[in-house]
Image (tube, rainbow, N blue to C red):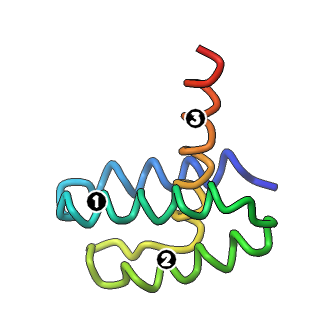
Amino acid sequence: MPICGFKGQWDAWRTIERHFLKSIDYVRLEDKAHEVLKANLTLQQMVGEAKVIAKQFAGMTATPLTPEHVMGLIFSLAAQSEARRDA
C-alpha cells in the first residue's frame, strides 16, 4: 500500500490549499479524519469513509480534495499520534 504516497499527496494539497480553506473547515476536516482513525475500521471501511469526506468538502477549494488526500490525512494523523505516544 502506498501510504507514503498518500501522505505526500496530502502534504502537497494542504500546502497549496491551506490559505484558501477556511480555518473552521480545516478543523472540521481534521476532526472527521480523527473520527475515522479512532473508529477502528478496516482499511476498506476507511477508504469508504475517505470517499464520503472528500464529497462533503467538494468545491471548497481550487484543487479538489480527493479520497487519496483524505487517506493521506488519516495516515498523517496516525503517524502524529504514534510519535506523541512514543515521546
Specify the quadrant of the image occupied by residue 76.
top right
Badge nearest the viewer, 2 or 3: 3
Marks counted in the figure total 3
Mark 1 element type: helix
Q: Which label is found at residue 50?
A: none
> Where is residue 16 shown, x and y percent of the image?
30, 55
Residue placed most toward the observer, 11 or 27: 27
Q: Quadrant of the N terminus?
A: bottom right
> Where is residue 63 shown, x and y percent of the image?
34, 72
> Where is residue 47 shown, x and y percent of the image?
69, 73
66 up-or-down from 10: above or below: below
Q: What residue type is labelled 3?
A: Ser
Specify the quadrant of the image occupied by residue 80.
top right
| Residue in the image at 26% along x and 66% along y | 25
| Residue in the image at 74% along x and 59% along y | 40
Residue placed most toward the observer, 63 or 32: 32
Q: Which residue bears the numbered disc 2?
A: 53
Closer to the N terminus: mark 3 or mark 1? Answer: 1
Task: Determine the CA span between mark 2 and mark 3.
Answer: 21 Å
Are the two marked residues, 3 and 1, in contact with CB atoms closer than 8 angstroms?
Answer: no
47 up-or-down from 4: above or below: below
Mark 3 element type: helix
Task: Determine the CA span between mark 2 and mark 1.
Answer: 16 Å
Are the two marked residues, 2 and 1, in contact with CB atoms closer than 8 angstroms?
Answer: no
Mark 2 element type: helix
Q: Which residue bears the numbered disc 3?
A: 81
Apparent side of residue 14 relative to residue 2 in the rendered image (left or right): left
